[in-house]
Amino acid sequence: MLHIVLAGKEHDVLAEFGTELHQADEVDIRQVDSAAAALNLIKERCVDLVVVGQSLTDTTPIDCVMQLIREKPMVNCAMLSAMDRDAFHEATEGLGILMQLQPKPCSEEAVVLLSKIELLSSLLSNGAEN
């Protein structure tokens, strides 16, 4: 089962994207509106992915990702952003963000993101076997 956290104030947009993410066989999605709540969730449980929206109640999206990776350096993150691709890369370089998503992500982005998570999971499980 995939455990996904959707963090942001864009409740409708994130809920709609969460529906797209349910394409995977077993998905548990939790939606929160703050970095603090997302941080609590990754402390409490094994989370496969955190999707960070463009705004949170308590901090910026980039600061949210920084807090998450400080707590769990291997947490997978994606971020909604209207930034130009190069500007996004520059602003988030070194944070290990898997994917920049459109401000209103589409079903194709959900498919790509899920395939990246599945690939990472299989690589990690294969590495654990060796």
Image (spheres, rainbow, N blue to C red):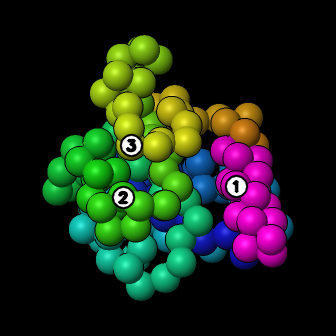
Amino acid type shown at disc 2: Ile
Question: What secondary structure is marked by label 1?
Answer: helix
User: Residue at 17% across / 56% down in the picture?
Assistant: 58
What is the magenta range? 113-130
Residue 15 in percent (x, y) is at: 53, 55
Whether residue 49 is situated above or below residue 98 in the rendered picture: below
Q: Does the residue at mark 2 contact the one at mark 1 (Cβ under 8 Å)?
A: no
Among the 4 quarters of the image, the one containing residue 22: bottom right
Q: What residue is disc 3 on?
A: 95
Q: Residues under labels 2 and 1: Cα distance?
A: 17 Å
Q: What residue is disc 2 on?
A: 69
Q: Nearer the viewer, residue 36 or 77?
A: 77
Among the 4 quarters of the image, the one containing residue 42: bottom left
Amino acid type shown at disc 1: Leu
Q: Earlier in the sequence, mark 2 or mark 1?
A: 2
Q: Does the residue at mark 2 contact the one at mark 3 (Cβ under 8 Å)?
A: yes
Q: Which disc, if any, is residue 10?
A: none
Q: Earlier in the sequence, mark 2 or mark 3?
A: 2
Residue 51 located within the stretch drawn in magenta: no
Q: Nearer the viewer, residue 97 or 74?
A: 74
Residue 105 in percent (x, y) is at: 57, 36
Whether residue 4 is situated above or below residue 8 in the rendered picture: below
